[in-house]
């Protein structure tokens, strides 16, 4: 029997705050719809006054969220006026000075004010409400002239004060619980972030360790063997000695790059040590190293290359390095042409090789092309790579020159009025 896939949880259409506001508004509206007719029928309050004072009383819980002082003022006026406007004869047959809807509204506004704005403001509102309710029997002594009415009013005041105080304490506890929960949530998020950072640092350290123990060691062995070949093999000729020296120089350069990369990877809590990186002025040396391997490489550099931003120069050098390496690996024996054009707006690179004299070497997963494309896209440029009509291969990249302010970087043509051209 096929297992049922768990249904994805539906995202809440409304937040908890919206639902709480909607519930509070609904309760306030219900209390208002009950308070006005009760105040008019049971206490003899004129309907317009009952409507206005009831609206002020029941709107106080909603208003207390954003404007607590105005809400306290409105509630105080309404709570003070409603008992005084009641008919003494009718008031003796119903709860007085607090009707049931007024009592519930008092409890609600105390709870909302305490939860949202803290215990101090909530205590101020609680004390004000209790004191105002005590003034009603003093200003309307006829409503408590007899023992039964006095006992009823006393019981009403005690119940109202007790329930409001209980709500005040509950609101303090709930608000504290919510604050503690929010702090715990923030701490968990912070701990998760620190854990992810620590895992990233550990992974980078592991990669650096592997590179150091395997790749760097192997390159060191190659460099040592190539440098000492002329002493260990005395019968080799000058051409072989020059070839070994070139291998040693390439190995030393690779070790330097490896150490720089290891310094970047091992930046656990420290700033990475910044070392000079190759730029456009280093491309001729790169081409010379390729030529020493027996490859015919033509180079043409046009424009003021020294004025380009360092970021674009590094990317241009790396793209040229990778494209030339690909040409050497996959187009054995083919002539290669490298053209670099630098102006005030962009650096243009075009690396083209002719048809290979031997079948291309299989292998490689396209990571070189992917890396070049990513370098270009990070700078907002364009990149293309593909076969040419004559059976060769061409890589083209355009790197826009953008300075730190987001404007095109200016170049000084006076420093380099003539293009640099070099032919094989």
Image (cartoon, grey):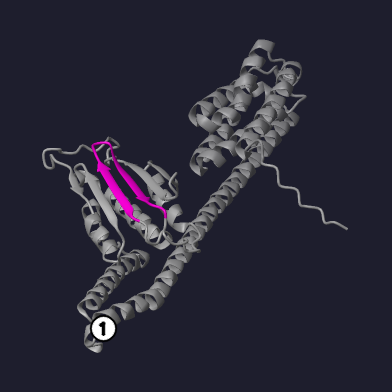
Depth check: give the residue in front, 289 or 153.
Answer: 289
Residue farthest front in this picture? 357
Please give left or right for residue 336 compared with residue 413 in the image: right
Tell me which corner region of the image, top left, top right, bottom left or bottom right, holds residue 204: bottom left
Point 75% across, 48% down: residue: 7
Tell me which corner region of the image, top left, top right, bottom left or bottom right, holds residue 263: bottom left
Pinpoint residue 6: horizontal percent, then vertical percent.
76, 52
Pinpoint residue 210: horizontal percent, then vertical percent.
42, 74
Picture layout, residue 131 above or below residue 379 = above
Do we see residue 107 in this rendering? no
- Residue count near mark 1 (Cα–Cα under 10 Å), binned few <14, some 14–19, many ≥20: some
Magenta span: predominant SS is strand
Depth check: give the residue in front, 144 or 322.
Answer: 322
Do we see residue 311 in this rendering? yes
Please give left or right for residue 416 compared with residue 29 in the image: left
- Residue 343 belongs to the span the image colors magenta: yes
Picture layout, residue 237 above or below residue 261 = below
Depth check: give the residue in front, 207 or 18.
Answer: 207
Pinpoint residue 370: horizontal percent, then vertical percent.
45, 53
Q: Which residues are magenta?
A: 335-355
Which secondary structure, mark 1? helix
Tell me the residue that label 1 is attached to: 229
Tell me which corner region of the image, top left, top right, bottom left or bottom right, holds residue 144: top right
Residue farthest right in this picture? 1
Point 32% across, 46% down: residue: 349
């Amino acid at each position: 029997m096929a297992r049922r896939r768990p249904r994805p949880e539906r995202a809440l259409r409304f937040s908890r705050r919206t639902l709480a506001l909607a519930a509070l508004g609904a309760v306030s509206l219900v209390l208002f719809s009950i308070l006005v007719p009760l105040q008019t029928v049971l206490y003899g309050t004129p309907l317009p006054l009952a409507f206005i004072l009831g609206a002020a009383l029941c709107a106080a819980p909603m208003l207390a969220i954003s404007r607590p002082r105005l809400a306290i003022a409105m509630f105080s006026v309404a709570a003070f006026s409603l008992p005084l406007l009641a008919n003494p004869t009718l008031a003796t047959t119903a709860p007085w000075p607090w009707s049931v809807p007024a009592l519930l509204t008092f409890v609600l506004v105390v709870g909302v004010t305490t939860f949202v704005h803290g215990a101090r403001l909530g205590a101020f509102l609680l004390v004000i409400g209790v004191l105002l309710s005590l003034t009603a029997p003093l200003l309307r002594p006829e409503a408590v002239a007899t023992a039964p009415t006095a006992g009823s009013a006393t019981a009403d005041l005690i119940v109202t004060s007790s329930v409001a105080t209980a709500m005040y304490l509950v609101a303090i506890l709930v608000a504290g619980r919510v604050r503690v929960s929010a702090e715990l949530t923030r701490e968990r998020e912070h701990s998760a972030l620190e854990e992810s950072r620590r895992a990233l640092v550990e992974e980078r350290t592991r990669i650096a360790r592997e590179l150091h123990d395997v790749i760097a060691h192997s390159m060191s062995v190659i460099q040592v063997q190539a440098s000492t070949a002329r002493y260990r093999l005395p019968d080799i000729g000058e051409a072989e000695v020059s070839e070994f020296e070139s291998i040693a120089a390439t190995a030393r350069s690779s070790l330097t790059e490896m150490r720089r990369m290891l310094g970047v990877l091992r930046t656990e809590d420290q700033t990475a040590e910044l070392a000079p990186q190759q730029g456009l002025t280093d491309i001729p040396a790169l081409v010379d190293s390729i030529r020493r391997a027996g490859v015919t490489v033509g180079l043409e550099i046009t424009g003021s290359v020294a004025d380009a931003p360092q970021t674009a120069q590094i990317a241009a050098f790396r793209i040229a390095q990778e494209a030339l390496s690909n040409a050497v690996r996959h187009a054995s024996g083919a002539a290669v042409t490298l053209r670099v054009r630098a102006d005030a707006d962009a650096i243009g690179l075009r690396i083209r090789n002719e048809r290979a004299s031997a079948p291309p070497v299989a292998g490689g997963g396209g990571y070189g092309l992917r890396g070049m494309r990513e370098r270009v896209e990070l700078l907002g440029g364009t990149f293309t790579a593909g076969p040419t009509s004559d059976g060769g291969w061409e890589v083209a990249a355009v790197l826009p020159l953008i300075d730190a302010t987001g404007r095109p970087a200016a170049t000084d043509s006076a420093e380099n009025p003539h293009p640099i051209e070099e032919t094989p």
